[in-house]
Image: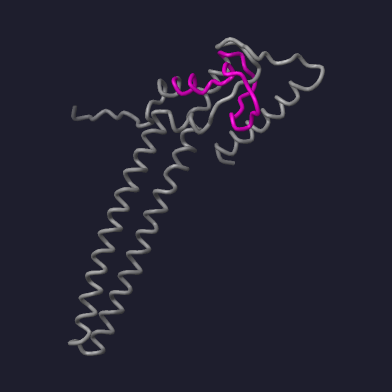
Amino acid sequence: MSVSRRISDLLRAGLIALALASAPGTAPAQSDAAPGATSPVVIVDQERLFDDSLFGQRVLAEIDTRSEELAAENRRIETMLITEERALTEQRRTMPREAFRRRAEEFDARVTKLRSEQVEKLRVVSRMRDDARQEFYGRIGPILQSVLAEREALVLLDRRAVLSAVEAADITDIAIARIDAEIGDGVEETGDASD
């Protein structure tokens, strides 16, 4: 089971716990709780947690850069292939039929190969975000656990699963600050032996 799947399952279980906690006969939730107040349930915005963290911002910048590079490369390849195709079309008039057929087949094979390579590069870029999110959520579990412990909370829910909550229940900013402090942008600093 993937890390993001486990987190989704935990959030779903938390929603059930919240429903039970607010069932008739239980104490009503405080609507004007002070910031930092303890609560058995806290919420986090999973999208912001990733997108606004140094880790997520680094990954998203890398994806943007790779996407732009790939788009520029695709434009260069397209221009090159159009030029080659025009040249081949011009040569058709002066070239023996069999020689032209061979050149046309070679050109088609090259186009197919280049297209396949570019599609694979696009797949790699598309997987970057999902792979990075899995790594991110795998690394932040202990950090979120420590924030929960400090706030004396028992359940963490994704904000999207909550219909209504006081702002004090949202620990997204606290979690982002802690994540940034503990894992930064996620790039491990390596010491160079020659330094």
Name the residue at the right extreme: 25
Is 71 placed above or below 24 here? below
Q: Which x, y percent locates residue 6?
A: 60, 36
Q: Nearer the viewer, residue 57 or 30?
A: 30
Q: Which x, y percent locates residue 125?
A: 39, 48
Residue 129 figure quarter: top left
| Scheme of image coloration | one colour
Indicate the quadrant containing the C terminus: top left, top right, bottom left or bottom right: top left
Q: Which x, y percent locates residue 50?
A: 46, 32
> Is residue 185 rendered to the left or right of residue 146?
left
Q: Which x, y percent locates residue 98?
A: 26, 89
| Number of marks drawn | 0
Q: Nearer the viewer, residue 81 or 127?
A: 81
Q: Residue at x 34, y 40 (%)?
A: 62
Q: Residue at x 56, y 21 (%)?
A: 170
Residue 188 figure quarter: top left
Is 35 placed above or below 188 here? above
Residue 115 figure quarter: bottom left
Whether residue 166 appears in magenta in the rendering, the answer is yes
Is 14 placed above or below 74 here? above
Whether residue 76 appears in magenta in the rendering, the answer is no
> Is residue 52 rendered to the left or right of residue 5?
left
Q: From which residue to which does the magenta span run?
A: 150-177
Q: Residue at x 46, y 36 (%)?
A: 135
Indicate the quadrant containing the N terminus: top left, top right, bottom left or bottom right: top right
Q: Residue at x 47, y 43 (%)?
A: 130
